[in-house]
Every structure is written in structure tokens, then in C-alpha cells.
Amino acid sequence: MDRVRARTLKPYERQKLHKMKRQLTNQVNSRHARIVLLSTGGVANAEIAWLCDCTPQWVRRILHRFNAQGIDGIIWYPFYADHTGQPRVFFADVVERIAEVALSPPKQLTGLNEWSLPKLRQYLIEQGVVPSISVEHLRQLLRQRGVRWRRTKTWKESADPQFVPKWRAIRRLYRRPPKDGRVLCVDEFGPLNLQPRHGICLARQGKVTRYRATYKRTLGVRHFLAYYDLKTDRLYGYLSERKKLPDFLGFLKWVRRRYPMSQRLHLVMDNYGTHVSVAVAAWAATHNVRLYFTPTNASWLNRIECHFGPLKKFALNNSDHRSHAEQEAAIMSYITWRNRRRPIGVQPLAKARNRAA
């Protein structure tokens, strides 16, 4: 009976299963998630059946589905056909059912890829969830339940055969940093062109800032070579014309000079070609540096990644830099503020103006 076990969970699968387990309006999904999580925790199938109030045969069926199809194989959508009549007064349970239909994939229910309020209204009436409802009332009910339009996001699953060992090594490094060393996250940001970059701004109606259009960019690009110090929560780096092996090796030597040679550096970086080169490995072995490479398509493990978004927003968006020196000055100004080395107001410039006046 216990020969069927749930396979090893991936990080995003464990997170989604815990969310399914906490569902109050869909007890089927909650039970299926509990079965998988208990199985990965080493609980026997007979005990899982007793804890989840189901039969051992059903436990084995759910585990087989999960091992073959993943989470999609154990999710249940209850609103394929429900023709029960409902009163015109929308009680809490009816509103809950409306929200659950709206949150269910429309492809599974209608064959369409997206919901719209009129199509959702039509489906609710056809399935007998509500006898009638206006589009505006439907919008208000969904808003009350916290259901709003959101943009979809992309994700990429790592196919690295060494994903689990690499993931565990980096996670262990983050959770328990070595006392005699320093953990640094290294990466490149770019290429950075000289081009107008749009963004958002506060403005009155009809007064939005406009930027020129460019089609020819003949001044080349720059790459921001940077590292993030987890202990001090500070970001450092400089701009380079290229990011080839000599440039990256020179950057690593610059990083090494910023710390005493007796202090071991633990560098987390992705598996870009120059990072995994023999020259970098040989240099690290002779300079008290240990390298940690993120798995393929899993650069989200590198904690410097989340700091490049704010850098782009506050240093590059809403700008039209005409030279690389001007663009570099904007980036360094943001980093100086981000590292708490200056107040947000550009006080030195204001004082200089006052002295000049």
C-alpha cells in the first residue's frame, strides 16, 4: 500500500500546495493538497487516508495523478455544470461561488483564454449560479471579494539535473552565512543603450512628458557589472564597455581588493559562459574565493536580481541620456542614495547654487 509515494516537490509546487491546503471554499483541492504534502513528509498512506477522511485507494489515485501530471492533475474545478436554482438575493455563499468561478481558468469552463465581465455574467446565468445579474453589480461583487484584473506573468522551470543540490547549497548559504567569510551576489545588468526610456510621472491632465524617438544609436552600449553584499545590504559596481572574460575577471579582482585577503568570499552567480570559465575557477582557487552557480534558468536564486528592477525604475526610466557619462552619473547617484550614503534630496547641488548666487 505504501509503495506509492509523492515525488520530490519543486519549490513553486510546495508553495502552491500550501495555498491549496488553506482553501476554505474548495475542500476537494484542500484535501488533495494535504494528501501530497503528507506523503512527501513520510506519512504512511493508511494514516493519510485516516487523517484526510478518505480511502487508501483514493490516496494512491491522487498520488499517481500528481506524479504523472503535477498539480494540474489534482486540481478540481466545481463549476462545469451546476443548474441548481438560486434566489435573487445574493447571500454570502452565492457571492463566494461567483468569486470562485471568476478565479477558475476560463479555458476549462468556456474554451476561451480570458474572462470578460459580460462573458462571466453569461456563464453564471447559463450554469444557474445566479438567475440574473448586471455587469456593474458583478464588477462590484468581485471587487468586494478582492478579485481584480491582473496581468499574467512568465515563469521558466529549471531543467538542470543538478537543480536540487545547487538550490540547497545556495539556500543554506543564505540562511547560515559563514562567520569567517562574506556572501556576495554577482551579476551584470545591460546592455544599456543611449535611448529615451519611458516611465510614469505625476502630471496634470494633458501635461504628460514626451520624449524623442530614436532609430540610430551609434555610441555603443555599456554593461553594469555589480555585486550585492548581503551582510551590509549594499550594492556596488561600475560600467564597462564589454562583459567578456578579461572584463569580468578584472571586475572580480576589483571586488577581491575591497575585502581583506584573509576573509573568504562566497560569490553567487549564474552560469553565464564567462562565469564558468577555467580562468575564473583558477583565479578563485588562488584568491580565497568560493563560487556558487545558480541552476540553469533559475537566476531568481541570485538575490542581486531583485535590485536591478528599482535601479532601472529610478535611474533609467523617464530619462533621455545623451552620453554614457550622463547615464553612469544617474546610476551612481541612485546607488549612492540606495546605499544610504546621501539623503534623497540633492543637497550638495543646492548648496553649490546658493554659494554661486
Image: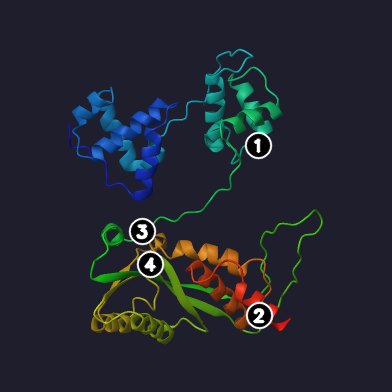
Label pair 1/3, CB-CB below 8 angstroms: no
Mark 1 element type: loop
Image spot of residue 170 (x, y percent): 30, 62
Q: Nearer the viewer, mark 1 or mark 2?
A: 2
Q: Which residue is mark 1?
A: 116
Mark 3 element type: loop
Q: Quadrant of residue 296?
A: bottom left
Label pair 1/2, CB-CB below 8 angstroms: no
Q: Residue at x 39, y 27 (%)?
A: 28
Amino acid identity at mark 1: Ser
Label pair 3/4, CB-CB below 8 angstroms: no
Q: Which residue is mark 3?
A: 159
Q: Which residue is mark 2?
A: 352
Amino acid identity at mark 3: Ala
Q: Which residue is mark 4?
A: 232
**How far, Cα to Cα, is label 1 from label 3?**
35 Å
Looking at the rendered image, the quarter that the C terminus falls into is bottom right
- Can residue 18 be seen by looking at this rendering? yes
**How far, Cα to Cα, is label 1 from label 4?**
47 Å
- Can residue 193 be seen by looking at this rendering? no
Amino acid identity at mark 2: Ala
Q: Is residue 334 above or below residue 135?
A: below
